[in-house]
Image: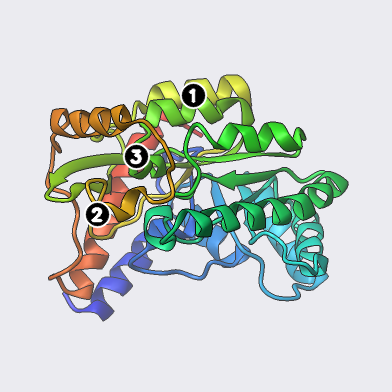
């Protein structure tokens, strides 16, 4: 099948939403291969056509009142939720506040942001670099929290392979706001040697929004490989996580963040990996490696290297279809 024929077939399929819908939504990164438009109206139209319940999306620059009304009407008329993707503010908070205000007008339920765009063990080469990042992050949060409180639009900060399950709760306690908490990513902190259950339980009291995913692990020479996999076949206790988070925030939304890509290398047996962790106990490394060795993947880890673009698109479509099937059973609309 050529790419043109594949896209045409996909468009035809998406034109007819499945009868069974799910409350689960998507993040744009769930389409890491196909890379659709991330802006709110286009993204909501796409995920609605797939039978999803909403998603996280950005706003275009300077959206006018007409565009904001279109987003609000489309979401409302189709019973969709949406959450704003927005970077934390710099010293000039004007663009951040304008985006928060616009999202509120367009019916967004919350905001997802993050302190780090990369990975702690790759980004920082010294402990001093990490400490500088911590200071800068708190400066940004101190600017952001009063703005989201003013507009009453909750802000969730994702555990983006930066803060450990031990470090992150202290951040939320420090600011102590009902409009500031966690965007809980179910799988990211495996890369920091936190178990999914440990991370979810630690952040559950602060949950604002979520990135749901299932993960598989596999040992390699310098540590272990980490992959997102179809929901229900990996190491995350998803039903337990859903129940716990709903008990803390009954209207919490679950947005799939399943990236179709090569496995990530978690080089936890190298010296550089540890430079930002200070005196973190060695027993955590031992426990993580024992966990990896005791949880062999039930299927080969997904990979896109070595296959064509058309094959990668087809792989992504199959994985997302499996996730939707799981969600229709566990998270019905």
Spot occupied by residue 151 in the image (x, y as percentages of width and height): 85, 49
Please name whichever residue, 131 or 16, is drawn nearer the observer in this view of the structure: 131
Q: Nearer the viewer, residue 222 or 217?
A: 222
Q: Are marks 2 and 1 in contact (CB under 8 Å)?
A: no
Q: Neighbour class for label 2 at 10 Å: few (<14), some, many (≥20)?
A: some
State the CA–CA distance, disc 2 to disc 3: 11 Å
Question: In this figure, which residue is indicated by the disc labeled 3?
Answer: 190
Q: Which residue is mark 1?
A: 201
Looking at the image, tell me whether mark 1 or mark 3 is earlier in sequence order: 3
The residue positioned 60% from the left and 51% from the top of the image is: 134
Task: Kindly identify which residue carries mark 2.
Answer: 265
Q: Earlier in the sequence, mark 2 or mark 3?
A: 3
Q: Which quadrant of the structure image shows residue 92?
A: bottom right
Classify 249 as above or below 159: above
Tell me the quarter of the image containing the N terminus: bottom left
Residue 229 is left or right of residue 124, and the answer is: left
Task: Farthest residue to the right: give it.
Answer: 150
Residue 227 visible here: yes
Q: Marks 1 and 3: CB-CB under 8 Å?
A: no
Residue placed most toward the observer, 78 or 39 = 39
Residue at 29 percent across and 57 percent down: it is: 260
Q: Position of residue 299 (x, y in %)?
A: 13, 42
Disc 2 or disc 1, which is closer to the eye?
2
Q: Is residue 18 above or below residue 292?
A: below
Spatial separation of the CA atoms under disc 2 and disc 1: 25 Å
Q: Earlier in the sequence, mark 2 or mark 1?
A: 1
């Amino acid at each position: 099948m050529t790419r043109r024929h594949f896209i045409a077939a996909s468009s035809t399929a998406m034109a007819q939403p499945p009868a069974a819908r799910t409350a689960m939504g998507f993040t744009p990164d769930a389409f890491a291969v196909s890379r659709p438009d991330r802006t709110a109206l286009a993204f909501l139209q796409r995920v609605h056509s797939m039978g999803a319940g909403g998603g996280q999306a950005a706003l275009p620059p300077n959206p006018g009142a007409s565009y904001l009304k279109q987003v609000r009407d489309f979401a409302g008329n189709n019973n969709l939720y949406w959450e704003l993707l927005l970077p934390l503010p710099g010293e000039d908070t004007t663009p951040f506040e304008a985006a928060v205000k616009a999202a509120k007008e367009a019916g967004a339920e919350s905001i997802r942001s993050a302190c780090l765009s990369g990975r702690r063990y790759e980004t920082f080469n010294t402990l001093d670099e990490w400490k500088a990042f911590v200071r800068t992050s708190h400066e940004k949060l101190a600017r952001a929290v009063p703005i989201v409180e003013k507009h009453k639009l909750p802000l969730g900060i994702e555990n983006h392979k930066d803060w450990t399950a031990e470090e992150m709760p202290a951040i939320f306690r420090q600011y102590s706001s009902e409009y500031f908490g966690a965007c809980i990513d179910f799988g990211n902190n495996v890369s920091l040697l936190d178990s999914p259950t440990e991370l979810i339980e630690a952040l559950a009291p602060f949950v604002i929004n979520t990135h749901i995913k299932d993960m598989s692990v596999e040992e390699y020479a310098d540590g272990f490989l980490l992959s997102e996999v179809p929901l229900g076949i990996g190491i995350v206790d998803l039903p337990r996580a859903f129940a716990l988070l709903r008990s803390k925030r009954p209207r919490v939304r679950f947005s799939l963040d399943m990236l179709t890509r090569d496995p990530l290398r978690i080089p936890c047996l190298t010296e550089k990996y540890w430079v930002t962790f200070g005196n973190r106990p060695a027993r955590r490394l031992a426990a993580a490696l024992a966990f990896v060795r005791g949880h062999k993947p039930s299927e080969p880890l997904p990979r896109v290297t070595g296959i064509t673009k058309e094959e990668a698109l087809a792989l992504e479509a199959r994985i997302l279809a499996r996730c939707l099937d799981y969600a229709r059973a566990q998270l019905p609309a």
